[in-house]
Amino acid sequence: MRSLTRTGRARGRRLFLQYGLPWGGALLVGLLAVLYAQWSNDAYEIFLHWIAGRTWLAFLITPFMTMLAVYMTRRWFSGSEGSGIPQVIAALHAPPDETLMRRLFGLRVIVGKLVVSLIGFLGGLTIGREGPTVHLGAAVMAETRRFYPHQGKRLERALLLAGAAAGLSGAFNTPLAGVIFAIEELARDFESRTNGVMITAVVFSGLTSMALAGNYLYFGQINVPQNFHLQFAVPVVVIALLCGLTGAAFNWALLRWEVWMPRPLQQWRAHKPLLYGLAIGLAVAALGVFTHGQTWGSGYDQARHLLDGQNTVSPFYAVTKWAAMVISYMSGMPGGLFSPSLSIGAGLAQWVHMVFGWAPMPALIALCMAGYLAAVTQSPLTSFVIVMEMTNGTGMVIPMMAVALVATRISNLFTPPLYEALAEKNYFGAGAHHKAA
C-alpha cells in the first residue's frame, strides 16, 4: 500500500511539473497581460484628464514623471529598463550565468517593469506596453523553474521562450505571431518549432486573454479590395523603401546615441540622472504641446482613427512621433516599441497616400505598419503576421509579406537587428559595461 501511495505521489508530482506548472504559469501570464493593458490605458487616460484644457501642465507632469521613472529605474530596478526584449535575448544567448538571470528577471524586475512603465504612461511618454509584456511573461515563466528538481540551460531556455511568446500573444491577442516571434526574433533558430511548452503557453495565455478581454481585433477589421491590380506593386515598392530607411534611421539613433546626443546631455546621462530625466521630460512635453497632443502615449488612438477613416493626423505626425519615440526610449525607463512603431507606420501611410491617392488608405496603413515594424525589429515574419492578426487582413498577406521582407533587407544594410544589438551592447557583449539605453 505504501509503495502504491509513493508511486501515486511521484506520478502526481510528475504530472504537475509536466502540465500543471507550465499551464498555471501561462494562465498567470495571460492574466497579467490583460491587467497590464488595462492599467496602462487607465494611466494614460489619467494623464489626459490632468492636462485637459490646460496643456501647459504637461511641462510640469511629464518632466516630474520622467525624473521619477529614471531615478527608480537606476536606483532600484536595474534590469527592467527599455522594452525588455533585449533582456530575454541576452538570457537566451549569453553563456549560462545565474547572476545575469537575477539581474534581468525575478520579482524585483517584474515589480519595476510594471510600476515604472505605468509612471511613464502617467507622464504621457511615447512608449508601448507590448515589449514589457514580453519581458513580464518571460520573467513569470522563468520563476517556475525553481520548482523543477533538475534545472539547466535547456529548461531555462524553454521557459523563457514560452513566457515571451505568451506575453506577446496576450498583449496583442495574436497567438500565431507569439509563436513566430519566439522562433524568429528571440531564438533565431528552428529547433524551437518543437517546443511544446511554448505552444502550450501561447494557447493558455490566449485563452485567458480571450476570457477576460474578449476575442477582439487590436486595430479592428480593415476593409480592403479583394483583388489588387498590377499597378499596386508601385506603392508596395515605395512603402518598402520608405519604411526600410526610416526604420534604419530609428535603429541608428538608438544604437549610436553617442554620436548625435549633445555632450552635456551625455554627461548628465552618466552622472546626473535627475537632470537628464528633466531634459527628456521637457522635450517630450514640448513635442506633445506643439503637436496638440498627438505624440503623447503609444499612438494607438491615432493609428486606429486613421484605419477607421475617422480623421487624419498632421502630415508631420510620422516625424514628430518618431522623434518623441527616440527621446522617450533614451530615458532608459521601461517601455516598448511595438505600438509606437505601428503608429509611425500609420503616419507614413499618409505620405504614400498623397502620391498614390487612388490606393485604399487602410491597405496603405496596413502595409506601412508591417514595413516599419519589420525595419525596426528586422523580423519580417513576426511583423506581417502581427499586423495581419491585428486587422484580420488575410487579403493583404502577399503585399504585406513583400513589404516586410524588403524593408527588413534595406534596414539591415545600415544597422544590425535592434534588439539583438541592444542585448549584446548592454548585457553580454563587449559593451555590456554601458548603461542600457
Image (spheres, grey):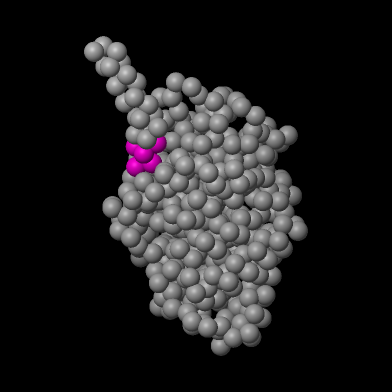
In this image, 55 relative to 395: left or right?
Answer: left
Vertical arrangement, residue 214 with respect to residue 147, above or below: below
Q: 158 or 50: which is nearer to us?
A: 158
Magenta span has 101? no
Q: Residue at x 54, y 35 (%)?
A: 157
Q: Residue at x 47, y 56 (%)?
A: 176
Q: 198 or 280: which is nearer to us?
A: 198
Picture coordinates of residue 304, whole percent (x, y): 43, 69
Vertical arrangement, residue 217 with respect to residue 349, above or below: above
Q: Quadrant of the C terminus?
A: top right
Q: Residue at x 56, y 60 (%)?
A: 383
Q: 78 or 99: which is nearer to us?
A: 99
Picture coordinates of residue 416, whole percent (x, y): 71, 51
Picture coordinates of residue 394, whole percent (x, y): 48, 70
| View extreme (bottom): residue | 358
Tell me the quarter of the picture where residue 90 sits.
Answer: top right
The part of the chain drawn in magenta is 22-27
Q: Residue at x 34, y 21 (%)?
A: 10
- How many numbered marks appear? 0
Q: Report the magenta stretch's main SS.
A: helix
In this image, 205 relative to 85: left or right?
Answer: left
Vertical arrangement, residue 237 with respect to residue 356, above or below: above
Q: Quadrant of the N terminus?
A: top left
Picture coordinates of residue 207, whole percent (x, y): 33, 51
